[in-house]
Amino acid sequence: MDQIQTNVLLKNWRRLLPIAMAAISFIILLPLTRIEFDRHHDGYMLAQAIAIHDGAVVHRDVFAQYGPVTPWLQSLALYLPLGPALAIRVLNAAFIALTIYLLADIGRKRATFSPITYSAGLFAATAWFVLSDVLIGVTMLPWPSTLAACVSVASLYFLIRALGYVNGDFHKRARIYALLSGALLGVLLFTKINVGAYTIIAMFIGLTVLEWKSKVFSQRLLPYVAAGSIIIFLGIFSYLQMCGAWDSYISQAVLWPLEWSGSGGSSLSQIIEFGKLLSPQALPVFLVGLVIAIQCKRRGKPTERFRPWLYTACTLLVGVFVILIENRSYFDTSQSIGYLLKPNTLFLQLTIFNYDYLNFFIALVIASIISIVLISLWRLLRHQMHLERFGYWLLLTGVAGAGAYTVIPRWDPRHVWWALPVGMLLLGTTLSKSRITWRISRNPLWLPIFAICFMAVFSTLGTLGHGPLRKGWDESPSTLITAGMLLSHDNLNAMVEDQRLINKYIGDGKLAVFLVPDGDLSVLSGKYQSIDAAFVDWGIEFDLQARLRNKPVVVAYGLNPATLPNTTKVALRDYELREMNGRLMIFIPKPS
């Protein structure tokens, strides 16, 4: 490489680094897409993709709980020269990598008064990726939440770009970016309605405050964002209406999720339960907040009065203490001191993955949102902050809060991770404003930080190299929808047996009614074999007896007929059990 090429790389490193991070993330995730097949989650999404790929209309012909966008994109992924299940997994890895790029690049071009820095984006991208439980072998789910996270970050990304170009000679570019941001909000609404609704509200409020009575921006972008959203909404609405699928969309993607999320109690009770879950994070969050507050307080002090070694040491001690607290479930408290004194174990303990870390970060995000809004509002009222800066903080905290709020119906680790990307950007922005990294880099104690990072990286690589990828998996045969994947022995045998049983009674254009919880059963042949939209026994209200009338085959889930619900037994009174394998039962009409 000559000197000119070197200079070009150095000049464009800020542009190239996010691309490199996304590419590396995708390369790391690619082999993990092969690991195991979740017959419920993977199967549910795969059935929709295969049905649409075969010509079905989403919602009208196939049930889709989260809206049409994800099934549409996943049906396109089936054109890849891969097994169907692996293809939608690879698409999911691409969504994650794209989110990494958008987070890492969002602060590269800063608008006036924008608090989002380049380092904040790099922090968010790195932290969000490292926190993924996929890295320790948990099954990657090609769920709409991954796409929703990507689209919400992309919408914020283009809005920040639009605000950066709103002045000067780039009015046209600003309008285009604003339209793109709004269009993505429209897409988000049909990707996962709760994420879309909360994000739209947050972004419109933030942008309204940002542009209200502003003397900085030469044009208003809110109308263009609104126009982009309306155009996409009307486009998808018109398509679904013309296909006769709009009413089914409302029933499946709006009313059913509302009924399902409300089954666990009222929103207030859910918020209280979520608060109880996060209550053990109060001390770690307080300690981290205290460190950031001290750093912010000292930011404006003269350099000669600053003792960098003291603040760095305190920061490191707080960090280690927080890690120890988060690992408390792994400690025998009676032997903690002896455990820590054992050689070569502290490193492993500090870098072991623990789901408490996700709870810690979501708690830290929520605490940051509340603190930043209150502090910014206080400073605005005291005329210590520009309205535009307050609008930016409101925009960022609003979108982060929209993501955090979507966790409340289901606060398992995977849903928390899906909700965190913009929250991690908020944390990165807060850290960059406190200049913690600048202070730490001014003294020799920065070395332990790099040492810990070095250990964490190699711990992750060790997990990837010696954990899930070297476990005893069975290669899926090419005759299954999981072709190219690695499955556990029991899972593979069950799929082969179920495929053999179903294909014995269904085929050559003959379809069946599926009374099963797992979506893969309707597509084990590679084709959508459900006679109607309800390929699973949940999510769609129907008259079961009317549905089963004069159907050639019924596939029911259960050990034997005695395990079926009473309503199903009554509906099957005109059918006889033909065959079963311990999981599935095949019923055919009784001879007349």
Image (spheres, grey):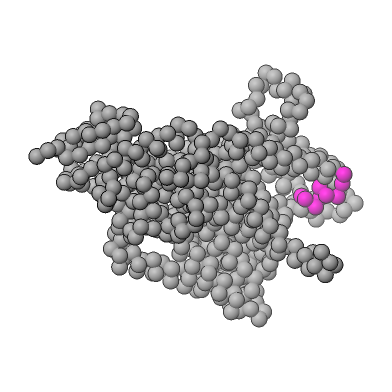
In the picture as drawn, the residue positioned furthest to the top comes out as: 334
Residue 42 in picture, x, y percent from top left: 44, 45
Residue at 75 percent across and 46 percent down: it is 294
Q: Does 417 appear above or below 351?
A: below
Q: Residue at x 83, y 53 (%)?
A: 301
Q: Over which residues does the magenta segment extend?
A: 436-444
Most foreground residue, 423 or 94: 94
Residue 68 visible? The answer is: yes
- From this viewpoint, is residue 121 visible? no
- Point out the residue furthest to the bottom here: 169
Q: Quadrant of the C terminus?
A: top left
Task: Name the one closer to the observer, 389 or 259.
Answer: 259
Residue beneath the point at 56% across and 75% down:
175
From the top left corner, tell me how far across and down residue 228 is, in percent. 48, 71
Q: Give the image location of residue 123, x and y in percent.
A: 68, 52
**Relative horizontal placement of residue 502, taking residue 43 as reference (left or right):** left
Residue 385 among magenta residues: no
The image quarter in which residue 560 lies = top left
- Displayed quadrant of residue 245: bottom left
User: Relative to 571, is 457 on the left or the right?
Assistant: right
